[in-house]
Image (cartoon, grey):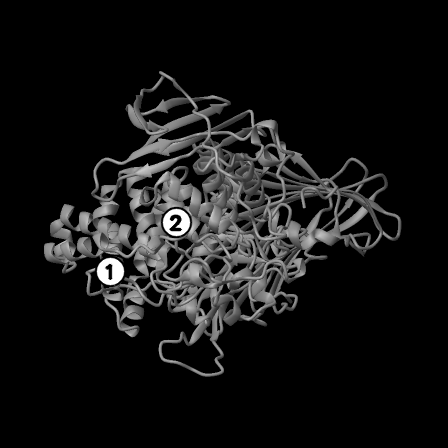
Amino acid sequence: MISHPSFACEPWLLRETELSLEVLAQSESVFALANGHIGWRGNLDEGEPHGLPGAYLNGVHEVHPLPYGESGYGYPESGETAVNVTDGKIVRLLVDDEPFDLRYGELVAHERVLDFRTGVLSRTVDWISPAGTGARVVSRRLVSFAQRSIAAVEYVVEPLDTAITVAVQSELVANEQLPRTSGDPRVSAVIDTPLRAEEDFAQDTRLRLLHCTGHSDQRVGVAADHLVQGPEGTSWSAESEPDVSRFTVTATLAPGQRLRLVKFVAYGWSAQRSLPAVRDQVEGAVAAARSSGWEGLLAEQREYLDDFWSRADVEVDGDQKIQQAVRFALFHVLQAAARAERRAVPAKGLTGTGYDGHAFWDTESFVLPVLSYTAPGAVAAALRWRHEMLPEALERARQLGLAGAAFPWRTISGAECSAYWPAGTAAFHVDADIADAVVRYVAATGDEEFERGPGLELLVHTARLWHSLGRADAEGVFHVDGVTGPDEYSAIARDNLYTNLMARRNLRAAAACALRFADEAAELGATAEEAAAWQAAADRMAVPYNEQLGVHEQSAGFTTLERWDFEATAPEQYPLLLHFPYFDLYRKQVVKQADLVLAMMTCPDAFTKEEKARNFAYYEALTVRDSSLSACCQAVLAAETGHLRLAWDYLGEAALMDLEDLEHNTRDGLHIASLAGTWVALVVGLGGMRQYGGAGAGEPLVGFAPRLPAALTRLAFTVLIRGRRLRVEIRGDEARYVLLEGEPLDLLHHGDRFTVTAGEPIGHAVPPAPTHPEPRQPRGREPLPCVPAGPGDAAQP
């Protein structure tokens, strides 16, 4: 999309210089505003034309039966779908009785700008009506990071040349008509009229609507208040009905005059609080926002983002498109999680209803690693949400005949709601992903209170699951049978390597943490004997390896399967899941997304350098990247094994997944994990950042092994490690480490330990990359070149 002529490439902005209806739905996603609690798609102010209208509250969903041709024990009975709640961003305009609709009349100019530093979406429009009357509209909108329940719009109208009479209609609209969905399983189901009206109100400048979902019984309240500035004679009125509450301002504007409307919108919801309580909640929030005023909200937003960028910015010299993309990515990752506060981080954030608004393991494996080092408070909140979902996970494990907790593969409320049973039942790796996120967060922050409380409980219950799920064979080797790993083109496998290695980490971390906090562990019934059993299982964990090929197996026996016929697969037959039966995919060597490669990224100490190189080359030839989660992992291992040009290309794919609409489904919302993968590919990949230790295993240590592709002249980033701000700057053959604040910090540079002190930068030489034969990808699935290859990135013989 950013290569579309309507878009400009700027380091801190996403700018659309003209309205292009052919990419309207995609632009609504990339221009979305959110704070983790509220989400507003980037729809035009007047509501139409639109691709997918959307206003979302994190956690608000409707339940519906899951249909099965044949039912089975343990199948989830209900699905969950995020609903479009009351839309508070709509401001309609009539100019001399002509509706302001950009499909009619003459659109003279149209520009939208999303500023990553201010968190404001701005729009400027010059339009001439079919009757020949001209008007200019300038609007700004934000979803507040500082005031969690608040979003706001500033809307200004003025004539272009001759006097005009205008009517501005600010609305709250429930049960908007939504476009029908396609057959793509990645697209959400449409639930007609999901909200049942309970109360509507309009008086003076204030509006309010309260609704309740039909089956999940979640009450949603929205209130709005307005400030009006206009010439003498400006008047207004308010009216309301069950699904629409409207505030209308009328004025006659001479050239040089303008009408300014500021709209403050407050959202609240609850599955437990009464109607009066939710009403009072939104009325109180909108009153506080009006007290702050528009300028106050702007100032709070800028202050919040200044603080974020001071510890999160990534600077890329050599490619303006990637520089823009990484800031776009970080901004949207922050928007997905900043104020979620014990709610899930959905795969699409709050930018659309793709995947029904569900959260997956993407959160712990891709999003939380970024936030652990840039916005750790959001990580604690996300993990506390998992902790609060423990009752459902414990019940799910009991239903499956297992000990411990079985967390859902996809969910909104904490209950498993996937009808795809090979994942919804067998993708147990989500337990280990959650445990890994706990270990990483504690290591990055030193939050002992969390570790001895929710962290310990999560580790104990996930370890119990692995110990009951696995078994020891006659030789004492511990196997985990019948599971589905990250690669969804393989299922119900024995000893999926990623699952086994992550389970091993989980078991060891739980054992260490239980011994460290013995009293708290005892309250959970975890004894020293149980911890020893976890440690023994971890020590004997099966690690599938093909001696003949000299590579690890994605799962036991995987390398003996027939290879997929990539030569006979046409480009239009990707993604394979939409054109071939899963039965055929399951029994072939074909990989949807990084699985074993992800294992090498998350468990780097489990492999030698030589094993990583051989494994990477082998699985490159099988991986088709039908998932947005794959490219960033491949970028990390490509960089580590010396394929810097390939790493750069994969980085480009992760970074531009939505900005270029590479999977043709950005219209349904952004790929938050792939956006997080942009940071992962740059910082973990090219920066070589790794974390060692944690969760009772001693003082954690962070290391870096940076190398740059020829396309880059400089890469600099800041990370937050136990309250210290560390800046890393890489130029060619040197890396410099600067501790911006905090106590001295021990680090690793390509394996060598050193200490950095505030105000005393330390430089280290960057060794040359290892050389290995260039790996091959399946025919037609090579990553598109991010930039022309440089002389230093030629394939190694």
Q: Is residue 507 left or right of residue 624?
A: left
Position of 244 relative to 290 (above/below)? below
Q: Secondary structure at mark 2?
A: loop
Give the quarter of the image for residue 377.
Answer: top left
| Relative vertical location of residue 455 with respect to residue 587 in this rendering, above or below | above
Q: List x then y, in percent, for residue 233.
A: 73, 46
Q: Count the marks: how many?
A: 2
User: On the picture, is 170 further left or further right than 701?
Assistant: right
**Image quadrant of residue 609?**
top left
Q: Is residue 103 left or right of residue 355?
A: right
Q: Quadrant of residue 137?
A: top right
1 or 2: mark nearer the eye: 2
Q: Earlier in the sequence, mark 1 or mark 2?
A: 1
- Disc 2 marks which amino acid? Gly
Residue at figure coordinates x 83%, y 43% from the top left: 163
Nearest the camera: 415 or 154?
A: 415
Residue 384 seen in the figure? no
Q: Position of residue 447 (x, y in %)?
A: 26, 41
Q: Secondary structure at mark 1?
A: strand
Label 1 sits on residue: 478
Q: Where is residue 3 drawn, in percent x and y?
A: 70, 42
User: Is 451 located above or below residue 567 in the figure?
Assistant: above
Give how far apart the Cα atoms at labels 1 and 2 are. Answer: 22 Å
For disc 2, the marked residue is: 550
